[in-house]
Amino acid sequence: MVTTLQADKIVDARGAQCPGPLVELIRAIKEVPVGTVVEVWTQEPRTKEDAKAWCERAGHEFLGAFPADGYERVLVRKKR
Amino acid sequence: MGRAKVVIVGGGVGGTFVANLLAKQNDRLEVTVVDATGVHHYQPGLLYVPFGWERPERLRHDERRLLHPAVQLLQAPVERIDVDARQLRLPDGGMLPYDFLVIATGSCPMPDEIPSLAEGSHHFYTEPAAVRLREALHRFEGGRLIVGIAGFPYKCPPAPLEFTLLLDDWLRRRGLRKRTELVFVTPLPQLFSIPTVTPLFEELFARKDITVETFFNTEQVEPERRRLVSLEGTELDYDLLVLIPPHRGSPLIDASALGDKGGWVPTDRNTLQVKGQERLFALGDATDLPVSKSGAAAHFQAPVLAQNLLRLIAGQEPDARYDGSVMCLVETGNGKATLLRFNYEQPPKPPRPSLWFRWQKTLLNRFYPALVPKGIALGEFLALLQGKFARTEPFCGSALMEQWSQKVAFLRELGR
């Protein structure tokens, strides 16, 4: 199950409005080594699609978005 | 309590306006504005400086002359806010005690956060930068001109788009547009951060043949090769580069350990009290509020803040609520503008650009120094303009009378 994936870094962007969560995700990806899984917590419904589109463009792996208690966990693996 | 001491740090839009409202509404307060320079910059005017359409010296105002006579002005840098001792630490060991403090310290562009951005790129968010860009633009003879956003947050979110549309006008007037490829880069998946506004700008940019590169997170600038490199792996060569740097809160906030990791002051979104600090309020760019960092937002926050502060001094609950209101008149090129008006709940629905909104923007830019000292809110001023020559119901006599009586009352206030 993908949902059991362990993130190496969690970014809590709950409460932040667009583009906040996406900006936080990109900032985190920039700072971690290749292979790291970054998880961003968001309450913005658009983050999932934006993160997916950004991963396609930037060459990272979009691992999915999973509902949690009042927010979504969006997981991305840095690939390059 | 005797005369309550209210100290306001920062003499920008928010600080100046709050000071004047407090002085106007309660003559038993001791209100002091502390500002490092004593010079008040009307920053929205910087947008026009690169084109030679505004002179920087006209944007500088003596802060003393903008303040109500009852407000004291202390021209000094603040080294630290000492919350426990309720005082400001000034240079040479000076101290300024307060009963209540208003943080209005603004935001700072941080070009050094991106490698070589400071050397390789221009912006127009400070007077020296805007003047430097004016010189570079007037030397420009064609080629690829890239404008864009280098990182978040930055103040006045529409300004880079406005600049690009005005730049298109300016290049056409100088006969350079056909020799210029205009490119706009943004880290976002679309042209603007608010979805209801994006289609209007996409249409304008497409009509003016401005290429848009989305998902472009600037990683570094290579000034020798005149190349811009993104985190996503895109490389763009340029002849002239105008990238708006990401902003941070004031260094004073970091030095006082009052901010989050971006240097923004955690602020209650409704009462404007600093979270966990009953005697501290904050407004404008300095806060972490989820609204645009802009003078217009500070303008709408100031009356709420002043009311809550007065209630707190009177021993009452601070129950005035800021609803997230922001209002921007946005340049769209060809001598036209549109209006973005929104709050926490309602997104903006920009009307078609028109000469009418552009005229309002011109009036606002001209009248600003007269409005602030009177403690007259931007909303009132624009309501006068909008209220509503454009959409009155001509045969509805009582509504018309009501509007005119409001206008007369407003003009009386202005003349007082």
Image: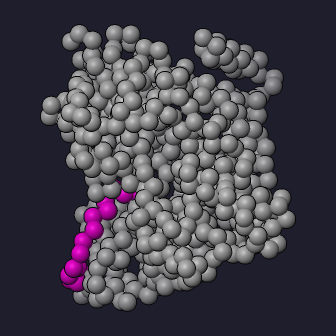
Residue at 35%, 61% in the rendered image: A43
* B361 with respect to B275 (left or right): right
Picture residue at 82% right of the left edge, 72% below the top:
B178
Region in magenta: A3-18
Q: Name the side, left or right, on which B94 lies relative to B189.
A: left
Q: Visible in this render: residue B196?
A: no
Q: At which x and y percent is residue B215?
A: 51, 75
Image: B111 above or below A53: above
Q: Nearer the viewer, residue B318 or B50?
A: B50
Q: Quadrant of the N terminus of chain B?
A: top left
> Which of the 4 image quarters holds residue B34?
top left
Between residue B251 and residue B366, name the one nearer to us: B251
Query: Does the magenta segment cover residue A12?
Result: yes
User: Which residue is drawn at the image coordinates 79% and 53% (left, top)?
Assistant: B334
Q: Residue furthest left?
A: B84
Q: Main secondary structure of the magenta part?
A: loop
Quadrant where the C terminus of chain B sits is: top right
